[in-house]
Image: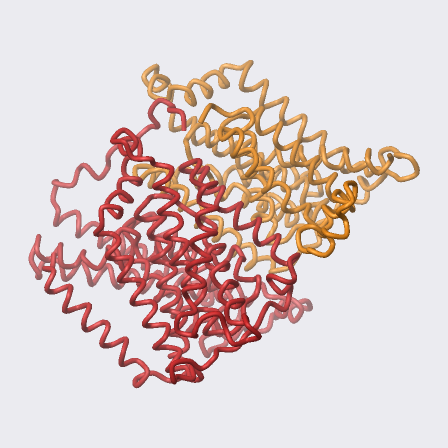
Chain colours: A orange, B red
Amino acid sequence: MDTLIVSLLNGVIYGLLLFMVSAGLTLVFGMMGVLNFAHASFYMLGAYFAYALQGTLGFWGAVVVSPLLVGLIGVIVERFVLRRVHRYGHGHELLLTFGLSIIIAELVKLCFGNFPVNYRVPASLDFAAFAVGNSDYPFYRVLMGAVAIAMFVLIFLLLTRTRVGIVVRSAIYKPRMAEALGHNVPAVFMGVFGVGAALAGLAGAVAGAFYTTNPNMAIDLGVVVFVVVVVGGLGSLSGAMLASLLIGVVTSLAVGVDASLADLLGLIGARAWAERIGGLFTLKLSSLAATIPFALMLVVLLVRPGGLLGEKA
Amino acid sequence: MRGRGGLGALGTVGVALLLALPWILSQGLLNASIQMLIAALFACAYNLLAGQAGMLSFGHAAYFGVGAFATVHAMNAFGGSGLLPTPLMPLAGALAGLIFGAIAGWFATQRTGAYFAMITLAIAELLHALAPHFKGLFGGEGGVSSTRMPSMGVTFGSTTQMYYLVLAWVLASLLALYLYTLTPLGRLTLGLRENSHRLRFLGYDVHKLSVLVFSISAMFSGIAGSLQVINNEAANYIVFDAGQSTAVVLNTYIGGARVFLGPAFGAALMTFFGYAVSDLTQSWLLYQGILFALVMMFAPSGLAGLFGMPDRLRRRFGTAAVVPFFALALASIVLLTAGTVFLVELLQRILSQDYRALAAGAPPWPPISLFGRQWSPAAAVTWLLPAAGVACGAATMLLARHKLALLEGRQEDTAAEPRAIEGERTPA
């Protein structure tokens, strides 16, 4: 029971982290129609910048400055790179961001080495928040969850309660009309791209200290984030939230389940047969945890091609 | 444009050259040529889907890998005597690629555009994550190995024989892919890219068509994977790695997706450079990524698209007028490349683990050896030299652009068209 609660909590917090990264991706997609392949690279940059800066600025300073730097890079990328190729179409933009993600990963390898760096939770934050049964629950996980929730509330209020939010939403919904009414739509695009990048950077700066910070973190997280936005429905913020939590909890629970298909078939007396076949039947669910998001995505595409909360396909 | 006869002659010369390679090249280079041929076929197979049908797949390693493993198991069938004679072995890869491509394609083509890209990526990742768990099929960490059996009086023991086997399959596949573009199906493939709504309106089943194109592309990718296994006599689940999918995307678009042999050219070029510089630099992928991004930004038709440019400009403005432009452009490219490579290599050496350990002590940092010379990291010249290279290169580039603008006069005002804004949102 305790293990269940702990893995549920872990799953929710991992889900919230996924949401921090996928929120920017899905916002940018909903707005510009660009799938930013380099989005997870911004997450990685956030972690590496925070790691590099924490010596001079301290942990909190680094966590604040690093997302700003990443956001600045995002603005530069949108203004000077993506905008140039916009007229060639979305496929071209997607390919270019794919190229950017390679360049960023290689530059990180060049500057920090092709191995995990020693970016850790500071000792002042490394304590138990509360105990579940007889195991302590780390405070830092709770902090990550809190940052993600605070961010979600902030974006939500910004988009629905402020004038800036109204302009942004109208620029997403009817860009030509918004422009005709005198709003600078390209500037709005640039801003949203920068904010999305900064959010990913923030997620990286906060989560990089807890999970590992290595040059593969972008691609590892990137594919899961893509799964999240497909499952949630591209362009839907609440869909991204739902899918993030779903995938976070499912993967976290799966890691703890030591059963295989053979055990399931054992209930109807076919265990011996299943074990003779081997292969898929005897694989433990826990070892398949990494593949569950992909399988989930294929199922969602089958029954609801538009994603859980997406538009109708 | 050259006439069809000219292209035919060029093709004949090219094939003759390829046939003569074993007499010209050393063993090592011949081996590299085999890799180049395989990469070229893979890129062309990929381009059928990405370039011609407009469906960007980021997980094509899956079909390459499936073809590879089908072949290695076919080679090991019947206690090692093989399911098929060795020269026909790629058929196993083709069949496996076709079947797996049809299944994966059925899922992936449910959606288009960015969704499609993500689904292909996820399918490849799924396979990559699952493969190590199936020891029987994919051999775990060690992979599956096999041996080429002699067949039809040929031992397939030497690199030369292997080269001819690969060459025959690659040429036949490229020919088939080229003939495909001439068929009605080939034209429909272009239609998928240009306007699938209209195709649907005309009564075609777009999903079926997409699955068909997807599986054909996967089939030829399977052949490429198959040839690699026959050459290496082993297959490892590493073939499913994202790096393989990345490479084919880079190769295809650096070469040029809109020209039939563009991807093959890009793949051959990149594979050759990868082979040539892999001992010299650890940043080859970085250079490749930068080249890719530059091509996408400034030469969207790829390197193959640039070939026609000198001829076009010469015809338009006369030889005398364009020579200075090309001299400047060439000089700028050389300077920029030299400056960037110098800078990257310098940084790579300074930031490396070994050097950091060496320089941990007092400020007189040890010099770095690069390009046969010693460079002190504290000396200004070490940094000014590459900076000057990049700056001069950029200045020359601006000058070259200015020259071109002068040539073109004011007839190219349309280049600075305002940024197109996304139209009203349409359901995907």
- Image coordinates of residue A4 in percent, x first then y, are 82, 35
The quarter of the picture where residue B337 lies is: bottom left
Residue A291 or residue A261, whichever sits in front? A261
Above or below, A226 relative to B370: above
Above or below, B43 relative to A195: below
- Image coordinates of residue A252 in percent, x first then y, are 73, 40
- Image coordinates of residue B365 in percent, x first then y, are 60, 70
Q: Residue at x 57, y 39 (%)?
A: A225
Split into 4 quadrants, where in the image is the N terminus of chain A? top right
Above or below, B255 relative to A9: below
Horizontal side of residue B390 vs A199, given as left or right: left
Determine if residue A68 is in view. no
Residue A179 or residue B349, whichever sits in front? A179
- Image coordinates of residue A96 in percent, x first then y, are 40, 46
Residue A269 or residue B20, whichever sits in front? A269
Horizontal side of residue A253 vs A70, given as left or right: right
